[in-house]
Image (cartoon, rainbow, N blue to C red):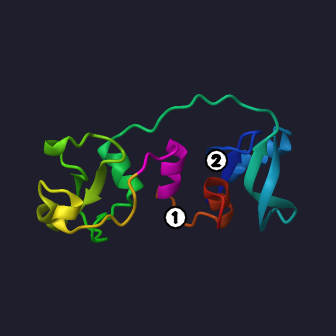
Amino acid sequence: MKKKVLVLNATHLPINITSWERAMLLLYKGKAAGVKYNGHLINGRYRLPEIIRLVNYVPVPYHEVVLSRKNIFLRDNHTCQYCGRTNTELTLDHVVPKSRGGEESWSNLVVCCPRCNSKKGDRTLEEAGLKLIGTPYRPPSALYLQLTRMNGVPASWHEQFFGQN
């Protein structure tokens, strides 16, 4: 059983993803309260949590997500932001070319396949006749990026991160 549990701070902000064993320990010790359960039972008696909330507020220092090649690939889900291709030969592209004042920033870097990168070259999107699939953005937290790597994320977690299913 490799179930993961989303941990919310006392303010209901997501702060961690932990194992179900650790979550059960926090519940047992009274350090957390169950918010959402997934319907499974442990030993036929204890409900398995999907989301828990810490009883006491824990100050968590805010760290901006580091702008790196790896994190941009995670944000864009290893998908070309012009044509939607996914393959192992992806690269990064500056939406506004560096030669035209484009900078190294979350809003100006996207994942791109070699074909689209060659087509775009040193031109703007309009000049190359390309459109972005999504808008480049700074991920809100490293926890958000961790969530993007996980398979089978419960719908209730999406509610906590995005306010919707």
Horizontal side, residue 116 vs residue 34: left or right: left
* Residue visible at 67% across and 60% down in the picture: 159
Q: Nearer the viewer, residue 102 or 33?
A: 102
Residue 109 lies, in percent from the top left, at 29, 49
Magenta stretch in the rendered image: 137-148
Quadrant where the N terminus is found in the figure: bottom right
Task: Identify the element where label 2 is drawn.
Answer: strand
Q: Residue at x 50, y 43 (%)?
A: 142
Quarter of image, res 27: top right
Is residue 113 in view from this perspective?
no
Which residue is identified by label 1? 151
- Image spot of residue 31 (x, y percent): 81, 38
Check residue 18 in the rendering and tell me which mark sits there, or answer none. Answer: 2
Residue 83 shows which numbered tag? none
Name the residue type under label 1.
Answer: Asn
On whether residue 147 falls in the magenta region, the answer is yes
